[in-house]
Image (spheres, rainbow, N blue to C red):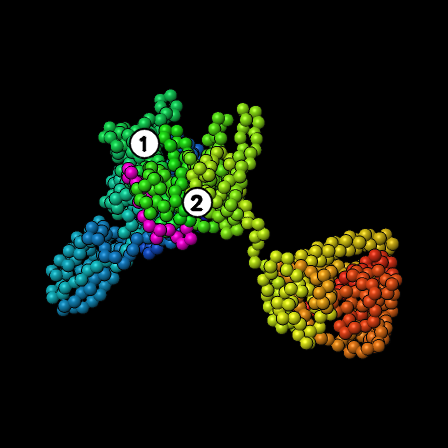
Amino acid sequence: MIRITRLTARLATLLQIFGLLLVPLGLPALAQSPSAEQLRMLQQLSPEQREAALELLMDEKLTLSQDEPVESPETIKPRNVKEEPDAGDEESADGDESEQASSEVMLRPFGYDLFAGEPTTFAPATDIPVPVDYIIGPGDTVQVQLFGKDNADYSLVVSRDGLLNFPELGPISVVGLRFQQMKDDLERRIAEQMIGVKASISMGRLRSIRVFVLGDAYRPGSYTVSALSTMTNALFVSGGINDIGSLRKVQLKREGRVVGRLDLYDLLLNGDTRGDVRLQPGDVIFIPPVGVRVGVSGEVRRPALYELRNEKTVAEVLQIAGGMLPTADPGAASIERINEQRERTVIGLDLSKQSGRNARVRPDDLIRVVPVLEKVESAVYLSGHVYREGDYQWRPGMRLSQLIPTTEALLPRADLHYVMIRRELSPDRRIKVISADLLAALAAKGSAADPVLQSRDQVFVFDLSDQRQATIEPILDELRSQSSAAEQTREVGAGGRVKVPGRYPLESNMRVSDLVRAAGGLQESAYTMEAELTRFEVIAGTSRVTEHRFIDLDAILQGDVDADFSLKPYDFLTIKEVPQWRERQVAGIVGEVNFPGQYTLSEGETLRSVLLRAGGLTDIAFPEGAIFVRENVKERERARLEELASRLEGDLTAAALQGAQSSGSPEIAEALALGQNLVNQLKATEPTGRLVIDLRAVLSGAIDADIELHDGDQLFIPRTTQEVTVVGEVQSPTSHLFERGLRRNDYIGRSGGYTLQADKRRTYVVRANGSVVTDDKGSLWFKKKGASGMRPGDTIVVPLDADRVKAITKWANVSQILYQLGLAAASAKTVGIF
């Protein structure tokens, strides 16, 4: 009966362990004790059934002391500490952070990211030397090598009874011995009982052990680990500690007693592994709930929520937070605390004093260490077109020439005459702007031209381009924000022929010459004899009037102080342009002239004048085919083409609607196809900008025929031609050799005659100079009366009979426009224009 009772108790213990191990897919489960009903059922079993159940459990190797050794035990993937907490932990986790995080301060508990990541295994290395204090147990393998009189190698496994069956020596009890003790005992026995034989003893494959990880672990349960595993190995295998578990009071229990405590802060902060003891079979790692937490935020090395153990003062808490950063302001620290009335209060803390560092902390305190102010004291800031931007040490009496001792400190093309200084005035911190001529300051160091700098001055150096308004505008905004009814915004402006037009800060005693310097100086086209100053003044607070004053700019440039007006808010200086000033204008003569090239134009110069400068025409020039191109004509042509294309598309839309109502009339379909073809041609046509001229009349001195040239005009004079071209609705559009006496219809006949779609009445001739000749009944572009007969270079155009397609009758002129543009482009290509 005593044996049955013991067997029942042992079976109940095994079933409890069995409940821990029955988990899906081999994962551990939370340990549960057998219920009273389960124990009652066990006691009802016969002794034979209890023995069979025990034998079954032993065969499945579910005992604590005899498991298969493992090299790399299966591990639980550690969770990421940034994931949302589990449902069961959500309320408490949120409660901790809400108590210690306010005013947008979000702190995470320290140390829990130790278990984050994607590890492959947490099993300890098995190929390292076995420590001398390793405890021998069932399943361990002992390697014995004998040498001397007899040589032999044995691999002996410790049995379940703790015996090592050694050949020739018999069973030897080694369970519970330390490795060094077992080694000494075996060597002693071999030396005494096997004369002339020595032994080398080491550990082979080690056993695996099963331990429990319970409490606030991420995955509580039982785990199979290597016999060399420590507490941290088991924690990693179980996924670590959850958000409400303690990192500082991890307990190691053995047979119901606490035999060790692990403070993970010692490991994380100091690398101290003394508390990370080696595990034995059946050990329980218990993780209690987290203790008191205190938050540390701001300018410390490790802002976080920290669990306290023995820390009592602010200094001790800051020590585990890594201490303060160099940017911290110790005198402005504070403690945010929840008092006994559950009210949030703030207590000032001066960490530069011993009393502040020794202040006692309470649960859920939040220690804030604020940074020093962003402003830099005893410094001036240099920026802009310089090699080294940044803060520079300020000293009393420091001048601009000491900050910028040489022009070598500036980038190329720096404006050496206008350096702007932004200054804050005490005590109201209002903005004031002054400027300096850097060259004058460097030439007369220590003089009035070399201004004295003050602490926190901002010095801006500009380049000679017009990109300075991006820097000046924010300063103007500051000045505008300071304005009121009693004080106008201190800004002035400059425009016209200055290098950098725009708005500038109004300085004290600023004059016209200072504004010209701020605007980068005068352009070469500036009229230096006179300038205009526009002034706005408020009269008796009732109205604002505008006044224009003429400035003797020449006197100002000569240094006349009396002529150099003092400026007031909103003054605007306009620098005029020299009369008849213009940039270099060029016209080109290409082709059959004696000296082709680009010619600079004088004011009002005509085409005849430039042709004479080009040496006149050559003997093979064809003046009737001259092509004169002007840019503004090209732009008008482009606008006209776009307008026609838009109108045609509108007509096509109307025609498409009409065709839909007439059930798909063939005439409408033909009109739509032709119209769409015309639209596509219009969009693809490039304007030429050709202006029809009579070059022979120009050369003969006819005043009406001569034209004034513009910048960019181009004249192209081809060689003499002997062709007459026929295009359009003829059987074979081609060119024919010019023959005197042949008329228009003769050339059409040589091209096979008209097609069925030809409009014979509207046939016209385009002369080589671009003019158009028609019959008196026609009405076309560029009609030139009085012209008759065919000439070399003429083009005969036979248009489409638009009347045959009623829907596009009003589009007849479009094809003529396209023909003419095409002819002009073809002529231009002949002489290499396009």
| Mark seen at residue 457 | none
The quarter of the picture where residue 381 lies is: top left
Q: Up-down: is 765 above or below 184?
A: below
Residue at point 78%, 70% (across, down): 795
In space, the residues marked 2 and 1 are separated at their CA atoms by 62 Å
Residue at point 80%, 63% (across, down): 784
* Image x and y of residue 467, in percent: 48, 48
Q: Nearer the viewer, mark 2 or mark 1?
A: 2
Residue 24 visible at all: yes
Q: Amino acid at mark 1?
A: Ala
Q: Check the picture and name the quadrant holding the N terminus.
A: top left
Left-right relation of 318 to 95: left
Q: Amino acid at mark 2?
A: Gln
- Residue 769 sits inside the magenta stretch: no
* Image x and y of residue 421, in percent: 39, 40
Bounds of the magenta span?
Answer: 394-414
Q: Earlier in the sequence, mark 2 or mark 1?
A: 1
* Image x and y of residue 28, in percent: 40, 46
User: Judging from the image, what secondary structure is the residue with disc 1 in?
Assistant: strand
- Residue 405 sits inside the magenta stretch: yes
Q: Up-down: is 754 above or below 317?
A: below
Decide which of 686, 222 is in the foreground and name it: 686
- Within-10-Å neighbours for mark 2: few <14, some 14–19, many 20+: few
Main SS category, magenta section: loop
Decide which of 827, 247 is in the foreground and name it: 827
Left-right relation of 47 to 774: left
Q: Which residue is mark 2?
A: 558
Decide which of 818, 710 is in the foreground and name it: 710
The quarter of the picture where residue 318 lies is: top left
Q: Which residue is mark 1?
A: 333
Residue at point 74%, 54% (across, down): 643
Decide which of 385, 95 is in the foreground and name it: 385
